[in-house]
Amino acid sequence: MRRLHFKFLPLLAFVAGCGANAASPAATQVADVHVDSNPAQAAECGSGAVADTNSGTPDAVQDQGAPAPDVPKAEEKLQPGAFQSPWVLVKRLQEQNGHMHTDEVRYRASDKRLFQCSYTFNVIDAAVPATMKFLAQGIKHVIPNDKRSGGCIHLAPDNAIVWTTHRGNVQNPTFVTGWDISKFSADGKTMTPQQVPVLQEPGESYEGIDAANGLVYVALRLNGLGIYQPDPATHALTRLGSVSGLGSTWGVRVVGTTAYVTDIDGSFATVDVSDPKAPKLLGKLAIPGVAKGLTVEGKLVYLAAGEAGLVVLDVSNPSKPVILSQTKTLGSAIRTAYADGRVVVAAWNDTRAYDVSNPAAPKLIGALRLTTDTVYPSPYAEDGHPPATARTMGVAMNGKDIFVGNWWVPYAFALHPERAAPHLVVPEAANVIDFGPVAAGQSKAISFKLSNHGTAPLTIFSIWTGAANFTVKQTQLRINPGESAALDLAFAATATATKEYALLSLFSDDPDQPKRQAFLVANQAGFGVGKPLPETKGILVDGDEWSSSSAKGKVLLLGYWASFCPVCSVEVKDYQDRFQKKFGDKIEVVKLNANVPDTMDIVQAYVKNLGITYKIGLEDPSTHTFDAIQKNFKGVNPFPDDVVVGKDGVIRYVAREYDPDAIEAEILAALAQ
């Protein structure tokens, strides 16, 4: 059962007056000052109560490390500001299913409908976002040899047809098909979509899709771009032409006679499609990161580039596209949407809105973090983990109305670009901050980084833990936009040195996340930080065997994934771009599949499609590392999982939600030892 999280501004902020931004010196902390562990009651100020979501706010300036904050007089008490969120929740849409695994969403202004790819295909009446409703929901594709009756990953509206694709995995074969949405129920309240003929071509894998000029354009991964003609009567697709040499294509948008195509190996291409039977490459440009979704607006392209964030291109000369700007996002940028001089980016860990009136220097408006509860059965129910990040893979816009394709359900927000506010960023490892083994009577200290990815100073006015043997040095902090500060945490073991845990609580003037928590644990049995990595073996796609003992003396980045995990393709590719390319032979990068239900042939095809060159394969059946991670590090999704191991073979980092900045920081720290 899901709890409701109602967000209110602290009483202190309310007294200061809504909309009055507090004065803000540099990142500031007060050490060893007692703050009552029952903070003052809260009063509403700003965007109001938000149910079942920890939405975020801005992060205009990039993180610049964690400088030592100034220490004011011990008696000084930091006063929170009063801020209103740039994001105002309008609607959280849930009916039949609350765990949809949303991928792409697209809005069509002509009929004010929102189309959604997830485990199913869905159509939403979004004419009035506050009352948006499903016109069709839970529609499952019928695909030859399909084991799951699954959904779609990409879509493209085209008059009465909405085209859909899936790249394929162990349970879902790759396909292109579509839905005729012209028919309604007898009462006229719901649609009755009819599936059109399925296209499956030998040797093809289908990714992004677009419709224009009466034709359908599909990214064919290693085989480039395909152009198809729908039959006027049956809507069956026939290939007219294709162009290769584009890399491993993922996203496609067509405007007039030009197709704009992204390549996850790090490039962007323009293609002349004036003759659909003989499309021609016009220009190609190297792109930082992993190029994925894109939006074309006039002579500009707004491109989601994985860990490289938002990349803006000038395509006024399609033969010579030029990069105008690159703006890093917190997570991995996957898709973009544009409206009225603003761009919104779906970036896994959050959603970010930018003012792009100057495309050479996008200015952050705000960031939005959504959450879901982590509810576990006995014997783990006692843990009380805080809500976990709910991934965001898709986004659409209509003016200031933002439609967020969250992993669980779709949301509608109203964007208020005039508002400035702080935005607290807490590492994803907060779901389980593991102190590891601590001997009886001994203590251990760790540092935990907090950042303000906002447009106003952040005041954390109350910091405390729920158990006496877990302590935090700082009781309050002030962090300027773009800066970070470290919390000094400590644990003192009891005489028995048994498992102990507590919640770390942070109360701040972030209007969307006034209360954040982290789960602290020490001396838990089994897999964990501070312990040697159990011997882990894998069978790689090239037939070689791998064992963790062979990585001794090197820093090891070990991850777990599955082909049927929709987001794993993002992280699997990010591993190569961000970690393998950057660190090279300094570290060992390994990705293992937990072997259920994937098989080696599926893994080999998957890896070939993504162009992976680091060590990747199946976990050996004799190895139980994946199971050990799942047992001690609870999360809402089984994949992906990330582990960093030091040169000495001891585990340094474990997280069940992808956090590339935290992983990189841990790798750098391990290399320095």
Image (spheres, rainbow, N blue to C red):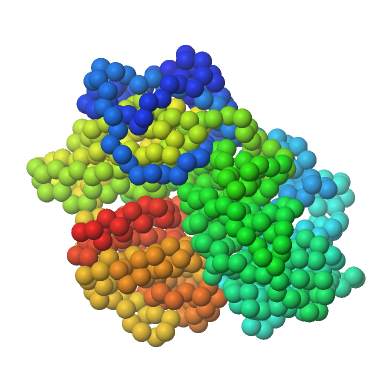
Outermost residue on the right side: it is: 233
> What's the residue at 36%, 39% (across, down)?
484
Residue 501 shown left or right of residue 577 in the figure: left
Residue 15 shown left or right of residue 234 in the figure: left
Outermost residue on the top side: it is: 15
Q: Position of residue 645 (x, y in %)?
A: 27, 62
Query: Which image quadrant: the C terminus?
Result: bottom left
Q: Is residue 42 visible?
A: no
Q: Quadrant of residue 470?
A: top left
Q: Position of residue 541 (x, y in %)?
A: 43, 81
Q: Is residue 258 visible?
A: yes
Nearer the observer, 418 or 500: 418
Q: Position of residue 620 (x, y in %)?
A: 35, 77
In the image, is residue 381 above or below residue 335? above
Q: Position of residue 53 (x, y in %)?
A: 53, 38
> What's the residue at 45%, 52% (across, down)?
636
> What's the residue at 84%, 58% (across, down)?
159
Nearer the observer, 471 or 294: 294
> What's the residue at 72%, 52% (across, down)?
297
Q: Quadrant of residue 25?
A: top left
Q: Quadrant of residue 225?
A: bottom right
In the image, is residue 640 above or below residue 511? below
Nearer the observer, 217 or 308: 308
In the image, is residue 95 above or below residue 481? below
Callout count? 0
